[in-house]
Amino acid sequence: NSSAQLCCQLICEDGRTRALNTCCSPALGLMSRFAERVVNDSVVNDSPNQSDADKGDEGASQFPLYLLPPIPKRGAGYRSEPIMGIVVVLAFSSLLVGLTHGMAAAGEGKYTGLTLATVCLIWIQALFAVLCLLFLLCANAGVVKRSPQTCYPVPSEVQWRLRANPNTDLGGLGNIEGPRGSYCIRCCVWRPSKEDGKSHHCSVCNRCVVGFDHHCGVFGRCIVRGNLPCFYMLIGLAFTGMATGLAAVAANASSAES
């Protein structure tokens, strides 16, 4: 027979099987080249179109986080500076509580309505002062923590350095600006853009924070948007505590006259 019926099965990358039934001429070499061309065309058509930038972003998002250097150690003042703040708050609170109690109980040693009110008020103020102090010291307000959301995409410069020397310091590199904001090469996290609040890497806390206002040397913590109300409240409680002590003196004097 001058022509033969030939069934060629072509298997593509996505697992689909196509059957090509054709009548071939005796020149089987032409048939094999035709089949190869069909396979190549199907692979090209079925594969996703990715630009070099997309491939780069995909590689950045797949970079293993365990290759990042360790989180920086806290500065020397991180643990020593809060001692002053703790002493100031506790000593001042104790002084005002004792003064108010002493003034309220002076004379006959009996609490009247006004003196009892000042005693209750000074204890409430002292409690709020301690709570604000604990929040400032322990809450880590505004700190940008490492997570897939804050670490990815890892900049290409950082990838090259860490793939060659994993878990090493990135000294020599500067902070990298990008569409997500600024990439800190010490914390290895993306910090929000300036529109979302001032971001800063504190040399004492050795962490990146958002909404930075200043680093307080008394409490040894960064004062940021998240703990600024507590900071202002501590300052305000100092004045209201003194006012409460003076009110206890005045209440005691009025009760003594009556």
Image: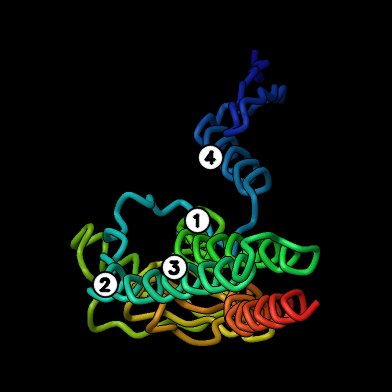
Q: Which residue is mark 4?
A: 33
Q: Amino acid at mark 4?
A: Arg
Q: Position of residue 150 (x, y in %)?
A: 53, 62
Circle 4 sits in a helix, a strand or a loop, which is it?
Answer: helix
* For residue 121, above or below residue 176: above
Circle 1 or circle 3, nearest the eye: 3
Q: Give the number of the disc on residue 129.
A: none
Sort mark 4 into few (<14), some (14-19) or many (20+) by Cα contacts within 10 Å.
few
Query: Where does label 2 land, which residue?
Result: 80
- Does label 4 or label 3 sit earlier along the sequence? 4
State yes or no: discs 3 and 2 in contact (Cβ < 8 Å).
Answer: no
CB contact under 8 Å: marks 1 and 2: no
Residue 1, visible in the rendered structure: yes
Considering only order in the chain, which callout, 4 or 2, is on the residue closer to the N terminus?
4
Q: Report x, y in % for residue 227.
A: 59, 71
Amino acid type indicated by mark 3: Leu
Q: Amino acid at mark 2?
A: Ser
Name the front one of labels 2 and 4: 2
Reading the image, the residue beneath label 3 is 90
Q: Is residue 46 above or below residue 175?
A: above
Question: CA separation, marks 1 and 2?
Answer: 39 Å
Q: Which residue is mark 1?
A: 61
